Image (spheres, helix red, strand yellow):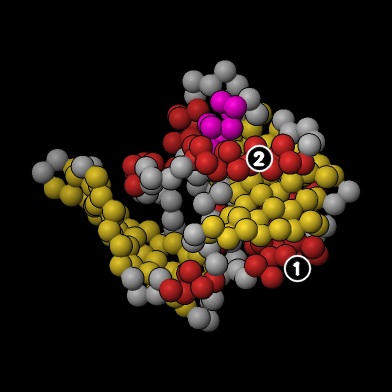
Amino acid sequence: MSCYEALAVYYDRLTADVDYHAFADRYEQAFREDGGVFHLLLDLCCGTGSLSLEMSQRGYEMISVDASEQMLMEAREKCSALPIPPLFLLQDAAELDLYGTVDAAFCSLEGINYLSPEQLDALFHRLHLFIRPGGLFLFDVRSPEYLAALDGDTFVDEDNNVFCLWRADFDPEMDALVYGMDLFSPEGKLWRRSREEHIEYAHSISWLSELLGKHGFSEFSALSEEDRVFIRCRRSR
């Protein structure tokens, strides 16, 4: 069972509380503190492109990558009026393949948690190839404790056009949170039911630091804010 297919068209409505401006501000603050030149950026696991749009409007040239064709369709439509829209690429993160290097890469809203340890190992290797020497990699994750605490919880999201119900179960063997999502949307006098399965892996901060170091990233720092951990590191020269 795949994810981010039926959900794609409703994603922005169900995540209207996400402050993308704050994410963009955080990234720009990191660029200012670094003092280097940051023009070409990679939005990894870009979803419906809200951050790609925000960063484009702030003057950055964007490459935006996602594994969901449906999410990219929403992103392309959202960014279609930009003078220079992002270059959208349909790729699995672990198979990232760019045409050259970028000045920085970011992965937001726990996109990293959606990748297994094996996929992350491949991704960090690929990122070392495609982030310029001295460039930054910025991302956020949910902590293992946060994910484990959701075990058995049920959640409901809705607006006038969609009703979303999902239940979370933590699988200790996979070390991951698995949640099935049911989406109900009106279709004439009836409702259409769609189902997706999402998996978020519990990556410890110490393990992420070790894996990034293995693939040539240094100056690792992690900052916990509420229920997220924001991580910053540099591609070694």
Where is residue 66 shown, x and y percent of the image? 56, 45
Q: Is residue 61 left or right of residue 178?
A: right
Q: Is residue 154 left or right of residue 212?
A: left
Is 7 magenta? The answer is: no
Q: Which of 195/102 is in front? A: 102
Where is residue 103 shown, x and y percent of the image? 75, 38
Where is residue 77 shown, x and y percent of the image? 45, 29
The residue that mark 1 highlights is 210
The residue that mark 2 highlights is 29
Q: Which residues are magenta?
A: 51-58
Q: Is residue 79 left or right of residue 196?
A: right
Q: Which of 141/19 is in front? A: 19
Q: Is residue 234 above or below residue 143?
A: above
Q: Main secondary structure of the magenta part?
A: helix
What residue lies at 46% left-to-right and 42% top-to-bottom? 19
- Residue positioned most to the left: 189
Crowdedness near tag 2: few (<14), some (14–19) or many (≥20) residues, C-alpha within 10 Å: few
What residue lies at 49% left-to-right and 40% top-to-bottom? 20
- Residue positioned most to the top: 83
In terms of sequence position, does the residue under pointer 1 or pointer 2 come before the other? 2
Q: Which amino acid is tagged 1?
A: Glu
Q: Which of 226/237 is in front? A: 226
Circle on res. 64: none
Is residue 118 in view from this perspective? Answer: no
Crowdedness near tag 1: few (<14), some (14–19) or many (≥20) residues, C-alpha within 10 Å: few
Q: Nearer the viewer, mark 1 or mark 2?
A: 2
